[in-house]
């Protein structure tokens, strides 16, 4: 049990106590397992990236290794596959949903988190219900409603339903933030003569940057990746978002694997880049979505 | 509600303060004003359609002509028609791949990984969680290239001399559903692992030391310390993965479109197909409502069972 250097072949019990160092076998197994799982997680993505950079002539529907860097697939996906246009639609829809959700959720959550009024509990739980509600429970009549209102094949037809769906998480998430703001702070703002709205915009919103960052990236990711709603609401090409574009593209050019891979890379790239920078916010947000009270 | 039953004094104060400004806040009515915009959008585009789905599920409607009253017919069909029962059976199989396998794998790995502080954890966490942030259509396209007849999996099998096992995984009657399931396992395992590893770091080290002093082996240590300490995380993981398994539309649409035959039809896909392709809106709605009920029931069971007394 000497706390000095632990040789590799120590009896297992000593090696496992936390006072000493761990056996190198333990270490090897641990890093080996983690490495294996990381490899499994990365293989499909590396495969897609590699195929996207390979030459287009290959008829193989599996992954291909690039013979040099072929950026032509991306250019082709952009122009021939119209992905430049689909990306624009996706950006418009995602930006609008993020902005609308943030504003509406903040206002509602401020009331739920700092005020008490009859029915607030019931109303709040109504929003929380949306966290587990599958889209399949609403999408059918939603289509007939939006068509009736002339909103199918418009950006609004994508923005409004997705905002409604994101509000469940938004209200839940921001309420947690407002509830954790120290009461004394609210009182101080009040004594300084700030109205409720001024307290929100001048004190709580600037202070809550981390909470807003999480909300923004999560809603952005959901909206960017949304498929079913776009499939149902949009039939004209002008309003097609990138996931929908990829699905149509696959239907038409299923043998053009390199081009398909390039398009898939274009779709994944924005979210992955944001994820790499704000990894903690993604994980935090996605894991708390289910931790209801 | 049940946690914070106000005492009598509180009730009186609440009533008395009805038209008076409350301590840190606002006159109460302002609260409704703040909630109104969100509630309007939420109500109009989520709650209202939900009610409509319930209504449509009681009708026979092809989406074009006049609807006729169906009563409980659509729900009865869900129980009796094999074509409608199959999607739910498939969903049950997918639950195994999406929820049970990833949680089990995550727990086993966590048990192996809690022995010391791993360096480079941020890197591993980032990579393991990555499948979660990808669009399912992208995941589907990537995995089609793995499971295709000339895909990576068959190449790998061929390389180790198992040519006999190669097949068109997504085009095979028996293997298409497990193949879609494996994709789900790939997506969800990282989520479980990240959750459990974070949770395991919050388990007090002394508990492990105490277990070891008592002479507990790795297995007993896992069941007496790690697993009880991860109760909340297991509950969250099961909730997220169960919902993901049952909401599975994108992946099926991209990889198999429910085929071959109806080997991979799942409730979410069937709702879409019936409502927008075969003109059975009532039946699609009944399926949507049933799916919702199943999701709510399962998440409730998970929270009750796994978190048990702590709730």
Image (cartoon, helix red, strand yellow):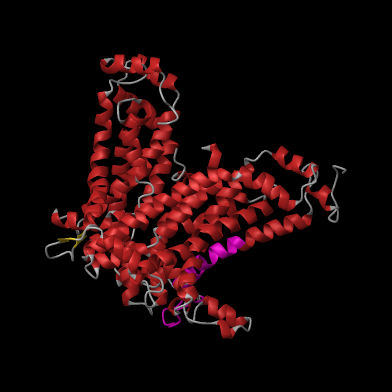
Give how far across and how far down residue A39 sits, in percent: 59, 64
The stretch of residues the image draws in magenta is: A37-65
Asked whether B62 or B186 is in front, the reply is: B62
Place residue B8 in its image quadrant.
top left
Residue A240 seen by the camera: no
Give how far across and how far down residue A3 sits, in percent: 85, 42
Place residue A155 in its image quadrant.
bottom left
Q: Is residue A57 above or below residue A152?
A: below
Residue name at image x 51 percent, y 50 percent: B237
Asked whether A280 or A259 is in front, the reply is: A280
The furthest residue to the bottom? B164
Q: Is residue B295 above or below residue A231?
A: above
The furthest residue to the left? B66
Give how far across and how far down residue A175 sits, in percent: 39, 34
Quick check: B5 left or right of B16?
right
The question of residue A187 being in magenta is answered with: no
Quick check: A280 left or right of A201?
right
Residue name at image x 62 percent, y 44 percent: B228
Q: Is residue B304 above or below residue A42?
A: above
The furthest residue to the right? A2
Give how far across and how far down residue B108 sits, in percent: 64, 56
The question of residue A40 being in magenta is answered with: yes
Asked whether B288 or A290 is in front, the reply is: B288
Residue A77 seen by the camera: yes
């Amino acid at each position: 049990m000497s706390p000095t250097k632990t040789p590799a072949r120590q009896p297992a019990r000593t090696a496992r106590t936390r006072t000493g160092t761990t056996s190198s076998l333990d270490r090897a197994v641990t890093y080996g397992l983690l490495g294996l799982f990381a490899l499994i997680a990365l293989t499909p993505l590396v495969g897609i990236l590699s195929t996207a950079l390979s030459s287009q002539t290959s008829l193989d529907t599996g992954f291909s290794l690039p013979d040099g860097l072929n950026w032509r697939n991306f250019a082709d996906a952009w122009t021939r596959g119209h992905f430049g246009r689909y990306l624009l639609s996706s950006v418009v829809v995602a930006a609008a949903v993020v902005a609308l959700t943030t504003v509406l959720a903040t206002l509602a959550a401020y009331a739920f988190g700092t005020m008490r009024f009859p029915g607030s509990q019931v109303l709040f739980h109504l929003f929380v219900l949306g966290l587990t509600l599958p889209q399949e429970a609403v999408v059918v009549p939603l289509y007939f409603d939006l068509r009736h209102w002339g909103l199918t094949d418009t950006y609004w037809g994508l923005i409004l339903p997705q905002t409604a769906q994101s509000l469940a998480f938004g209200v839940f998430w921001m309420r947690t933030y407002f509830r954790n703001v120290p009461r004394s702070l609210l009182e101080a703002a009040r004594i300084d003569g700030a109205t409720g709205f001024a307290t929100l915009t001048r004190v709580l919103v600037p202070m809550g940057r981390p909470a807003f960052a999480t909300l923004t990236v999560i809603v952005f990711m959901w909206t960017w990746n949304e498929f079913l709603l776009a499939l149902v609401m949009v039939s004209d090409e002008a309003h097609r978002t990138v996931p929908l574009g990829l699905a149509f593209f696959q239907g038409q050019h299923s043998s053009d694997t390199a081009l398909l891979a390039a398009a898939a890379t274009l779709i994944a790239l924005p979210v992955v880049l944001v994820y790499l920078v704000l990894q903690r916010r993604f994980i935090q947000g996605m894991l708390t979505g289910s931790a209801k009270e | 509600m049940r946690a914070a039953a106000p005492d009598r004094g509180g009730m009186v104060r609440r009533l008395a303060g009805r038209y008076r400004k409350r301590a840190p806040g606002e006159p109460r009515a302002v609260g409704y004003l703040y909630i109104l915009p969100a509630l309007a959008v939420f109500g109009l585009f989520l709650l209202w359609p939900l009610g409509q789905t319930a209504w449509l599920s009681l009708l026979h409607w092809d989406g074009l002509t006049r609807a006729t009253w169906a009563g409980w017919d659509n729900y009865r069909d869900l129980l009796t028609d094999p074509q409608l029962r199959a999607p739910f059976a498939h969903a049950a199989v997918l639950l195994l791949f999406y929820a049970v396998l990833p949680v089990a794998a995550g727990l086993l790995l966590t048990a192996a990984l809690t022995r010391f502080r791993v360096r480079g954890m941020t890197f591993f966490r980032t990579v393991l969680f990555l499948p979660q942030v990808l669009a399912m259509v992208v995941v589907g396209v990537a995995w089609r290239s793995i499971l295709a007849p000339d895909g990576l999996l068959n190449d790998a099998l061929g390389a180790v001399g198992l040519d006999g096992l190669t097949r068109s995984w997504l085009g095979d009657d028996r293997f298409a559903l497990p193949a879609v399931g494996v994709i789900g396992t790939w997506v969800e395992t990282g989520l479980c692992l990240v959750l459990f590893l974070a949770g395991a770091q919050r388990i007090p080290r002394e508990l492990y030391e105490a277990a070891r002093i008592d002479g507990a082996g790795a297995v007993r240590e896992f069941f007496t310390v790690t697993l009880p300490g991860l109760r909340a995380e297991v509950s969250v993981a099961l909730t997220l993965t169960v919902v993901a398994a049952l909401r599975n539309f994108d992946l099926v649409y991209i990889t198999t479109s429910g085929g071959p035959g109806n080997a991979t039809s799942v409730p979410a896909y069937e709702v879409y197909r019936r409502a927008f392709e075969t003109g059975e809106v009532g039946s699609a709605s009944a399926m949507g409502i049933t799916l919702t009920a199943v999701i709510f029931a399962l998440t409730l069971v998970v929270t009750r069972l796994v978190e048990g007394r702590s709730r």
